[in-house]
Image: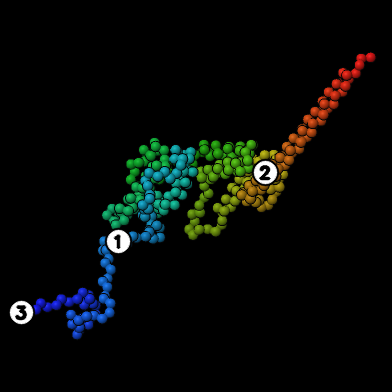
Amino acid sequence: MVSEPRRASYAAAVSGSGESSQGVHAGSPIIGSPVRAPPVINAQRVPQRNNTSEDIDNPLYLNVNENANVVLVSPPLTGSGNYSSWSISMRVALEVKNKWGLVDGSFIAPEYGHAQYGAWRRCNLIVKAWILKSVNTSIAQSVMYMEEAKEIWNDLRRRFSQRDAHRISSLQNEIYGLRQGSMTVNDYYTGCRTLWEEMNALRPLPICKCVPRCSCDLVDEIRKDREIDQIIRFLQGLNEEYNSLKSGVIVLDPLPELHKIFVMAEKFERQLNITNLNSIGLEIAHANAVETVQDHSDDSNTSVNFVNSRKPIQ
């Protein structure tokens, strides 16, 4: 009767050493701990890819949280009246999202069939949606059939960024007619600054087009002249209580920067408030003193009259 051969042990089967095939019998016991099997790795598990700085700096990168229904700028564009402030706010919002290159033309659209065409189209559509959500409904209806966000932006710029002579004239009247009145220095300065910035948007500083660029610093000189005009208008619009401040600043050469003059005016305002409070306190104390004297006088007259009324008639 033929005996059945013995089966090899598990340890011998998984041993990675060459001893099992070189002199070690399959049925011989193995000294030492058995060799452990390697851990099983799930082949379907894919590690998550972190967003690198290269992805974020890419204009075609879209965060998963981006929403086409978001209103980036409020209030919306209504026409030439608020185009200047709207365009600045919209540009800031698009630059924060790294999508301004799709609007100003610095990022050229790839041709159809290019590997990046799909990513560009998605970014173009979401920028187009952001612009349409940030303009008046009637304006959105007139540009919504344009394919590229760059075309929409250029169309709005051509329509509403023209230099309006009537608006410039109106701004000049407002700038020269603005007075502090009952406003605080901060509110008055804010009103001046708003008018000045709108005027600068309608009449921007010239840009040097020399190649190579010249070194005459003409633009800086024009900018300084505009700031001097703003300083003069700000001082002239302050109330008469600030005459000592105005006369002290206007004789300085060179004039201080505008923000420093604003700080000086605020300090002067606080000093005026303290002086006014002290004077009001003195007036109240004086009025109370007069009232007290009158009360004592009335009491004395009442006492004299009472005594006289008790005297017998001679």
Q: CA distance from mark 1 to mark 3?
A: 57 Å
Mark 1 is surrounded, within 10 Å at the Cα level, by few (under 14), some (14 to 19) or many (20 or more) other residues, namely few
Query: Which residue is found at the position 42% from the left and 43% from the top?
Result: 71
- Residue ID for mark 2: 269
The label shown at residue 215 is none
* Quadrant of the snapshot with the N terminus: bottom left
Q: Nearer the viewer, residue 306 or 279?
A: 306
Mark 2 is surrounded, within 10 Å at the Cα level, by few (under 14), some (14 to 19) or many (20 or more) other residues, namely some
Mark 2, mark 3: which one is toward the viewer?
3
Q: Residue furthest right?
A: 314
Q: Secondary structure at mark 3?
A: loop
- Residue ID for mark 3: 1
Cβ–Cβ under 8 Å for marks 2 and 1: no
Q: Give x and y (percent) for residue 269.
A: 67, 43
First in sequence: mark 1 or mark 3? 3
Q: Nearer the viewer, residue 162 or 293?
A: 293
The colour scheme is rainbow
Q: Give x and y (percent) for residue 311.
A: 90, 18
First in sequence: mark 2 or mark 3? 3
Q: CA distance from mark 2 to mark 3?
A: 121 Å
Mark count: 3
Amino acid type of disc 3? Met
* 164, above or below 62, in the image: above
